[in-house]
Image (tube, helix red, strand yellow):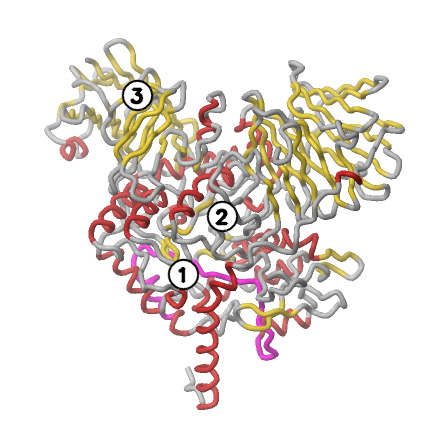
Amino acid sequence: MRPMNSTLRVFVIISTVIMLALSANLTSAFAAVTQPEADTPLNKDNLQKLSAQSIKKLDNGVQFDLGDYNAFIRIFSKDLVKVSILKDGQKDGQKEEYSPAIKRQDWKTPRFSTQDGKKEYTISTDELTIKISKAPFGVKFLDKQGNVINEDYLQNGAGSGYENGKPYVFKKTEKGENFYGFGEQAGLNFNQRGESIGMWNTDAYSYNKDTKYVYTSIPFFMGLKDKKAYGILFDNSYRSYYEMASESDDYYYFYANGGPLTYYFMNGPEISDVLDIYTELTGKMDLPAEWTLGLHQSKWEYQADEIVNVAKTYREKKIPLDTMHFDIDYMDGYRVFTWSEKYKQALKQLKSMPGFHAIAINDPAVKKDENYRLYQEGTKNDYWAKNADGTPFIGPVWPGDSAFPDFSKKEVRDWWAKNHDVLFDAGIDGVWNDMNEPAVFLDGPEYNHTMPLNSYFGYENDKKLHTEYHNLYGHDEAEATYNAWAMHKQNERPFVLTRDMFAGTQRYAALWTGDSVSNWEHLQMSIPMNTNIGLSGVSFVGNDIGGFAKRPDAELFARWMQVGAFLPFSRIHYDSDAKSEIKQGQEPWAFGPEVEEISKKYIEMRYQLLPYLYNAFQDSSETGKPVQQPLVYHYQEDENTYNINDQFMFGDSMMLAPVVTQGQTSRNVYLPKGETWVDFWTSKEYNGGQTIKVDAPLAHLPIFVKKDSVIPTREVQQYTGEKDLTNLVLDTYLKNEATYSFYEDDGKSLDHTKGEFDVTDFHITKKHNKIEFSKSMSTDNFDSAIKQFTLKLNNEKAPKKVQAANNIYKAAASLEAMTATKRSYFYDAGKKTLYVNIPVEERQKVQVKF
């Protein structure tokens, strides 16, 4: 590296001072940026009175002539219907027009029948009946029993249409109907009934529970009515609004500032059915690499040597960790796809230590610098977003004046993907997309911290105004980033983390909920926020553990670590010291020995539970099921679960009831109906359908497991892949019968997409005076390292005999001795727990006799 000349050295020093001063003063500036320009209310005195003038049956639905508009009811499947009202000339012919949200387009139209009546037209599938009122035009969905699932609200004579160019839909509701989803929303309530919701991706640094616009827009929600669920995707990328019975208990409505009136209706009746259909439409998530499920550590303005030293300290203290993150400091003057040499060397040191992965942040803004290769290429090839007059839009972000790639163009996405070799060649394993709302450091009324609404993307003959494309910007950037793996790491699973999403982005990226604050409100808010995001198709979600802005105290960090260890995406991440009143680290040891011990305990639990967690992600990749689940996901028959904000399911079997209030050392826990619940720590059993009070001192996270569950676990590792999985522990809570299908693959490559995986089915039953264990392989295409299964039976008596056909299992004196001996068992009388070591080659049923 050449030495700097004196002029350059002075320039660098001055630039650094300016940036530090800017950093120190951004808190107040950003905190004010909680909303774009003023909301655009719907004028209810100017709604359209549409009525059908003629009707035409189509191959996949029905077309209604509404005068200047056409309505299309298209049947995608027996439970999925697309509703559009479009002005004459707008595209929606036999070849469907799809937004970037939509993944699957090859729907096979099911059989449906039609009936034309005097006042209404009826379409019927095997599961749905759709009744369309002709005048005024309105749509009603009924199940096959004739119960109304959802219907347009026609009291004002205008259930749907356009108000001064704004597409709107009014829906009838009743007091008992509840609403969930809507992607990322601030607020302390899980149930969104009564809320006024807005969607416009906003850099909402230090947002609070009352902030209306945050980072991500997912215009999808579920209604739960009469214990039955349906879903609606309002497929419109303009700024949109949702008045969810906020004005009246009789109706709710949604609308957008422009664009088409198109929505998809999905019938459940189970919440799981709705999510499966929604993620079939918008795309299932990929099964992530196992290392991404370990703990991540990050800070804005970690010095290069700090990154290495923090990683070393984790290893020295034997606290598991997989990944260190490189924030914007690693770049050369914040130029994307460049390296500061000292951070590049730090990355080499990090990767030389066993088991560490690295993730680098990436921003979309490209510094305006005539000597910078990326800016040269983008300018030469016309790759930038444009001002209204056709010139490239230039706005200040971290590098100063910058251009913004036009990700709406495929050639720009390909170019962006190609440039990731700069990161991958240095040793980066994953990419973290930030500032992609897109954020611009201009806060006048024309800008509102982003580009002007009249700037545009696309081509001169096919322009997309910023008002339309804004909410899609991060989605297309996520696709471009995701595609970098196919170019440069062809058999590795991509990991993209993003701050900005639209419907469907789950097929490309994981989400974190932006720049939260180190306070109790944000810890409380994180649970309903994440569970609603999970009900919006995004399973891989997390929040900055400990909060990003400001600093937590020891109590808050300990409580947040207890929650954070069980987040789908688990990362400690915090703000620059320059913006904090106190210099306080947010590593597990930074608050003293007590909090370090608490943190280590729960981080180790996460690593023990990795087989269970990995299987939860595999399930999500097939069905759209969330990993962090609201209680209503499993218990929609139990109305007591509809408004619970501070409990959640971690996977299908474990329920967590964390403390999220300062100073609290006990709490009430609701146990859903229809289950027997076991206290994970004490093994005490409770019947469901009741609220109990539990002690929760600082070191204690209340956890309950439902009976007839199997939770696969393993020994603690310091990082994923440190040791082969040779002994799979089946932590079993048996009442009558428990089953589990255990999925296993190599955890890193794409070979599983070619069928290289195992599925082992376990079946455990209690019959009179014995328990029977059996297993079989439904798929056997992976070379597993598992040598034995440890069947762990909780709350059981000492056995009289354990055998499999003629093989008699021997009693062992300790758990360690049993683990080292084939066909053996150990009974822990103090804990009333029986462990049975079953070799993988055991073909017979194992019988535990009492």
- Specify the segment rendered in magenta: 345-372
Identify which amino acid the numbered label 3 is placed on.
Tyr
Q: Is residue 541 left or right of residue 536?
A: left
Tag 1: amino acid: Asp
- The image shows residue 305 at horizontal and vertical percentages of 32, 69
Q: How far apart are marks 3 and 1 (CA)?
A: 43 Å
Please report the residue visible at 78 percent of the width from the left and 37 percent of the height from the top.
Answer: 161
Residue farthest to the left, as pictured: 813
Disc with the residue nearer the chain's start (2 vs 1): 2
From the top left corner, tell me how far across and down residue 294 is, in percent: 36, 48
Say what amino acid the circle numbered 2 marks. Ala
Q: Is residue 366 visible?
A: yes
Would you say residue 368 sits in the magenta stretch? yes
76 vs 236: above or below: above
Q: In this view, does 249 lie above or below 521?
A: above
- Residue 277 in percent (x, y) is at 59, 31
Q: Quadrant of residue 364?
A: bottom right
Which numbered tag is attached to residue 575?
Answer: 1
**Left or right: 745 as drawn, with respect to 593:** right
